[in-house]
Amino acid sequence: MAVPRLFEADERRRWLVVAVGVAILLCLGSIYSFSVLAYHIRILFEKVYNIEVTATELQLPYTVALLTYALTMPIASSYIDRYGPRLVTSIGAVFVSLGWSLSAFARSIYQLTLTYGVLVGLGLGIAYNCPIVAARAWFPDRTGLAVGLVVLGFGLAPAVAGPATDALVANQYPEGVYRAFVVLGIVYGVVIALLASMLRTPPPDFNPGRQRNSGGQVDTVVWDLSREEVVRTKAFYALWICFAIGTLVGLMVIGVTKLVGIEVAESAGGGEIGESVSDLLTRLLVLYSICNSIGRPIFGWLNDRVGTDRAAVINYTLTILASITLLLNPASLAAYTICFAILWLNLGGWLALAPSATAKLFGRRDFARNYGLLFTAYGAGALAGNTMVGLVKDVYGRYTMVFPYVILLSIVGATIAAVALRPQAAGHNAHISTSIHAHNALEHSTALALPYPASVLAPRPLPSALLTSQVSFSTNSWGRTTFDATTIRMIVPRCNDR
């Protein structure tokens, strides 16, 4: 059967939404190049303004920006469905542009915290979830992959923003720093606002799974929890803790990437580094941002393939191995390069795991608000991680002394993921017995575990549904029996339609 022409147009449109989302997050993700900015800020304050800046103070604008971003997103996400992603993204663009531009006039680290930390953080929190919500709506059949591709832009941003910042500053203080803030602020604001005009949500009857099936009877398996119902599940708190630990490590590492590189280079060379080594460390951000970017579709795919629990354990295991290697090789630039590439990749992984796991565990209808609530873990991780690394540097004199704590936290996170995010644990005791009739008239019987407690569904009963559909069961290489969800329609009452 030929694919309908209308569906061909919708198929092209949904991939355009992904491309627009990547570009928007490419601008917003410039915050991940803060370690380059911090290098110039330290020189500006200490050599031009004669203000001594501690390691903890230097992290303050970055930490406040990430915290504001994380606290704003749950509030802003509530308005995406009401006003649409285009308007909300445009409002975020205004705050991002103002925050960057006004930072040029900051004369203390606390003024910079207000402009860069609060205003840029507000812009990020308002705009960040809009492309993700749009992509998730267009890709109900491949949520993990689509979200992973969109957030790829956020991870790739330092590859552009880092070298651009160095080029604009050009070792000219203070005028170079002023120029970088103003130019980047204007560029980000204009580009994000223009791209926002192209964000679209799909028509109400859009269903890629049904469109691709010649029988025209296909829909997806859906369970939808509201934000109020999500907070009554154990799976939410397990995922929140795991996400907080993952972002704590990742955001801490990103904030001090160049500073740690300088520390390692000085240990290897026995003295202060030259300008060529500093430039090399900035160029390494291109590699790290690429790793951060590819980590997003990789872990989005892993979440779809092997489940959130195993994907999270893989992520934490890589973090532990990288941390041990860094501790054993404190003066090796090769070890630094490889290990930081892994750590950047892992943070990218969490920023795909978290939204795709939210959709998988709690449903899609209230996704924006549910993911916004989960994203508060990002703020907690940012605050704890960057405060911790600053204190460790001030107390022990070396940034790398933070990695024993990273190892301990990763062990805790892996344990929680393995125990509380397993399908059996996340599914609790709510099951639906569904009779499924295959196209060859053979009956199959299966039980589908819902990722929330049965008490959440009370007092409404869950009827089983008799279906006629083509169903394929398979056992993947991880030993999990799966079925193609896009070939099944299951009629389940939505919990908050009471």
Image (tube, rainbow, N blue to C red):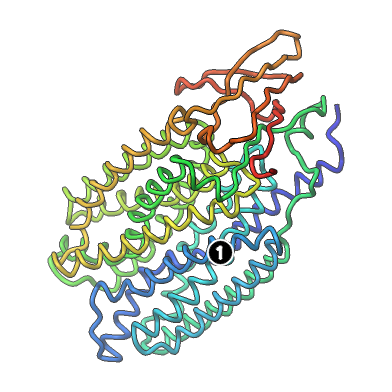
- x and y percentages locating residue 435 in the rendered image: 67, 16
438 and 283: which is toward the camera: 438
Give left or right: position of 9 versus 156: right
Q: Looking at the image, which residue is at 17% across and 64% down?
A: 398
Q: Is residue 34 above or below residue 307?
A: below
Q: Looking at the image, which residue is at 81% across and 41% down?
A: 7
Q: The disc labelled 1 sits on which kind of residue?
A: Ile
- x and y percentages locating residue 61 in the rendered image: 38, 75
Give left or right: position of 362 versus 269: right
Q: Is residue 317 above or below residue 330?
A: above
Q: Quadrant of residue 105?
A: bottom left
Give left or right: position of 91 versus 386: right
Q: Looking at the image, which residue is at 72% across and 28% down?
A: 489
- x and y percentages locating residue 109 in the rendered image: 34, 82
Location of mark 1 (residue): 75
Give left or right: position of 383 versus 444: left
Q: Residue furthest front?
A: 459
Instruction: Say if residue 298 shows up in the picture.
Output: yes
11 and 475: which is toward the camera: 475
34 and 390: which is toward the camera: 390
- x and y percentages locating residue 144 in the rendered image: 56, 42
Quarter the C terminus occupies = top right
Instruction: Say if residue 284 shows up in the picture.
Output: no
Q: Quadrant of residue 381?
A: bottom left
Q: Is residue 240 above or below residue 162?
A: above
Q: Looking at the image, which residue is at 48% across and 41% down?
A: 233
Dot 1 crowding, Cα within 10 Å, few <14, some 14–19, many 20+: some
